[in-house]
């Protein structure tokens, strides 16, 4: 959380807003009735976000205030990703996943943007976190043979399990090993699960609550889950796609009928709350007219952006994810993370083939699946390396103990025994050595469990703790190296060039070239956002085409007058400035009106706009 907070606050004030942030800035500063009227014509999908930002910008309207909620939402998402890793696997997986999420450049991009996408990601992560206990999706650490390990130890405050103890490799003093193989509870015995706590001391889990109480608790969990999903989808309607990912999670986890019933009720309630927004947003789909139908390459571009974007970090992340999926150690984590990163992008891609609406920012809420899977891959790699190391260490310990016992017996033999007694001792020595060698050949792991578990328990625990701490530190260092490798990308995100346009620079440039009192036209009206976001440099210009301002007309940028009224207003003007969108698909309506009475004196191309100066071709009037 501290890392994400620092990254979010670093360079938060870029000194400028871009076009989408300017929409948030002007809409959230209107009155609530004005916001309600505008949402009927434009930006209904962001309505709840504008309402939430209204009191904040009323207190202190600034760019930092505009972006601060996104920073806090990114911090919350990081904490929830870490919590999911802890709950579905182990604490070190959660730590690595949280750091990986915070160090991803695209996360800091939207954490420093005054739009709803960081809040949507936080809401989706919260809903996923609520789904896990409600659906009884628990951690299942899988061994190579498919069984679940039964021993664990928590280490150095991180509650990190020793991998060699998990897998019953040589040197593991598990509860089952000490109690004897094949031992089990007798008939009628009440078994309570042992849960590891700090220090490696097991405690008994609490007895199951009464069915009625358990049902009430589960009901509240599903109610909370449905409420969070509904609010998140109201922040942005495409967030409702998380329900499809969660349904696949329940399917993979083989959820029982009561779980499906609870989830179905919660999901139905959330969808019912979002349906009115979907109906209104469908009528406003012209706002997405600038989008084009996606190609399969767009899906890969999302993977590159979320798992990279640098080639080295992308390759390492994909390798770790492949390792986590090929040999899953935590199946419950895979069941949650894999659908989250796969299902919503595919569904949105399919929808965009019918109605173009595919963009990476609409899928930011799916990104937590990547660091979770990558962290699980690191844990799998550490477990494999640790197991081989433990086998070698345990073998050396066995040889040391056996050699020590042999030397002791030989020493007793050489002290001063004679005759018949020496022969008996020698025979006993030969039999002992033969038995131990035969036992080691027949059941190597059983001999290690029985011998080393008794002789070197404390030493083994200390070594396991040190190894676990080293593993955690190595994972943190690897994330730090990835951050340093992509540091130039993080620096770029703090610059105005990281966005599509720089409204502050555009307003300053227009202010230097124009003089107070000159008429200005915005073509199309959305280019009026420059004057709305930064009115001071353009304060002296006359917006001669504006008929009704945005707040009064229930629109973002106001309503312009018709061509006849515009020519009447330009009757006494000797010159006029035109700020036009530098987009080939935009039809220059106002330029056509000026062409008859004015001639183009010069044109200046600025980022995303054209600034044109027209002078009257004949006498005014």
Image: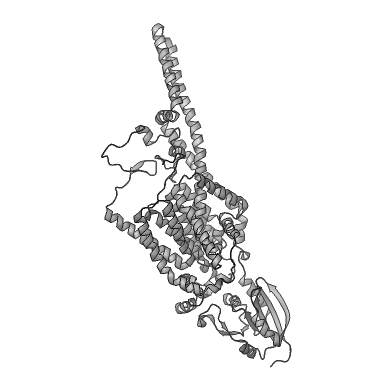
Please tell me whether residue 423 is drawn above or below residue 408 in the rendered image.
Answer: above
Count of numbered badges drawn on the protein: 0
Q: Position of residue 517 (x, y in %)?
A: 64, 85
What is the image's colouring? one colour
**Residue at 62% across / 70% down in the picture?**
502
Q: Quadrant of residue 169?
A: top left
**Residue at 49% across / 39% down in the picture?**
467
Q: Position of residue 476 (x, y in %)?
A: 53, 48
Q: Horizontally, is 15 left or right of 618 in the view?
A: left
- Which residue is the extreme one toward the top? 419
Q: Nearer the viewer, residue 385 or 413?
A: 385
Q: Position of residue 76 (x, y in %)?
A: 46, 59
- For the C terminus, the image quarter is bottom right
Q: In the rendered image, is residue 75 in sight? A: yes
Please tell me whether residue 293 is drawn above or below residue 617 in the rendered image.
Answer: above
Q: Position of residue 328 (x, y in %)?
A: 48, 45
Q: Nearer the viewer, residue 384 or 584?
A: 584
Q: In the rendered image, is residue 357 in sight? A: no
Q: Nearer the viewer, residue 456 or 361?
A: 361
Q: Horizontally, is 421 left or right of 610 in the view?
A: left
């Amino acid at each position: 959380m501290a890392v994400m907070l620092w990254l979010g606050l670093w360079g938060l004030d870029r000194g400028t807003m871009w076009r989408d942030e300017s929409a948030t800035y002007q809409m959230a500063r209107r009155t609530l009735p004005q916001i309600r009227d505008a949402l009927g014509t434009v930006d209904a999908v962001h309505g709840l976000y504008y309402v939430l930002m209204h009191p904040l910008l009323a207190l202190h309207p600034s760019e930092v205030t505009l972006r601060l909620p996104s920073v806090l939402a990114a911090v919350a998402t990081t904490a929830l990703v870490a919590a999911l890793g802890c709950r579905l696997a182990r604490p070190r997986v959660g730590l690595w996943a949280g750091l990986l999420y915070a160090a991803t450049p695209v996360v800091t991009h939207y954490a420093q943007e005054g739009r709803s996408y960081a809040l949507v990601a936080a809401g989706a992560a919260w809903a996923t976190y609520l789904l896990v206990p409600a659906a009884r999706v628990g951690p299942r650490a899988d061994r190579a043979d498919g069984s679940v390990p039964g021993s664990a130890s928590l280490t150095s405050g991180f509650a990190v399990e020793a991998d060699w103890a998990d897998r019953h490799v040589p040197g593991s003093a598990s509860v089952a090993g000490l109690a004897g193989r094949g031992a089990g509870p007798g008939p009628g015995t009440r078994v309570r699960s042992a849960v590891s706590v700090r220090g490696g001391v097991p405690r008994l889990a609490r007895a199951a609550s009464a069915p009625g109480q358990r049902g009430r608790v589960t009901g509240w969990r599903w109610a909370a889950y449905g409420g969070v999903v509904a609010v998140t989808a109201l922040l942005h309607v495409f967030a409702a796609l998380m329900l499809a990912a969660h349904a696949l999670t329940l399917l993979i986890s083989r959820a029982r009928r009561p779980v499906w019933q609870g989830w179905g009720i919660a999901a139905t309630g959330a969808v019912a709350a979002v349906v009115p927004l979907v109906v209104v947003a469908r009528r406003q789909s012209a706002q997405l007219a600038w989008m084009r139908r996606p190609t399969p390459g767009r899906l890969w571009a999302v993977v590159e952006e979320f798992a990279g974007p640098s080639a080295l970090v992308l390759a390492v992340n994909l390798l770790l994810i492949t390792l986590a999926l090929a040999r899953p150690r935590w199946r419950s984590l895979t069941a949650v993370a894999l659908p989250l990163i796969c299902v919503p992008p595919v569904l949105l891609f399919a929808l965009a083939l019918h109605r173009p609406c595919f963009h990476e920012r609409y899928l930011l809420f799916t990104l937590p699946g990547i660091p979770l899977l990558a962290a699980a891959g690191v844990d799998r790699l550490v477990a494999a390396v640790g197991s081989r190391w433990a086998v070698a260490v345990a073998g050396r310990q066995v040889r040391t103990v056996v050699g020590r016992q042999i030397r002791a017996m030989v020493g007793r033999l050489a002290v001063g025994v004679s005759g018949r007694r020496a022969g008996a001792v020698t025979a006993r020595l030969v039999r002992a050595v033969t038995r131990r060698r035969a036992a080691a050949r027949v059941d190597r792991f059983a001999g290690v469990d029985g011998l080393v578990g008794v002789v070197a328990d404390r030493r083994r625990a200390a070594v396991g703790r040190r190894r676990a701490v080293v593993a955690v530190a190595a994972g943190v260092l690897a994330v730090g190296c990835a951050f340093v490798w992509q540091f130039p990308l993080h620096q770029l995100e703090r610059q105005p060039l990281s966005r599509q346009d720089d409204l502050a620079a555009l307003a300053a440039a227009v202010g230097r070239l124009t003089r107070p009192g000159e008429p200005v036209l915005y073509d199309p009206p959305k280019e009026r956002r420059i004057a709305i976001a930064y009115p001071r440099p353009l304060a002296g210009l006359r917006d001669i085409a504006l008929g009704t301002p945005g707040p009064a007309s229930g629109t973002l940028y106001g309503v312009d007058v018709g061509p006849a009224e515009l020519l009447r207003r330009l009757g006494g003007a000797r010159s006029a400035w035109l700020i036009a969108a530098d987009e080939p698909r935009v039809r220059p309506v106002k330029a056509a009106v000026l062409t008859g009475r004015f001639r183009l004196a010069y044109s200046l191309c600025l980022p995303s706009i054209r600034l044109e100066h027209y002078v009257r071709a004949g006498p005014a009037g």
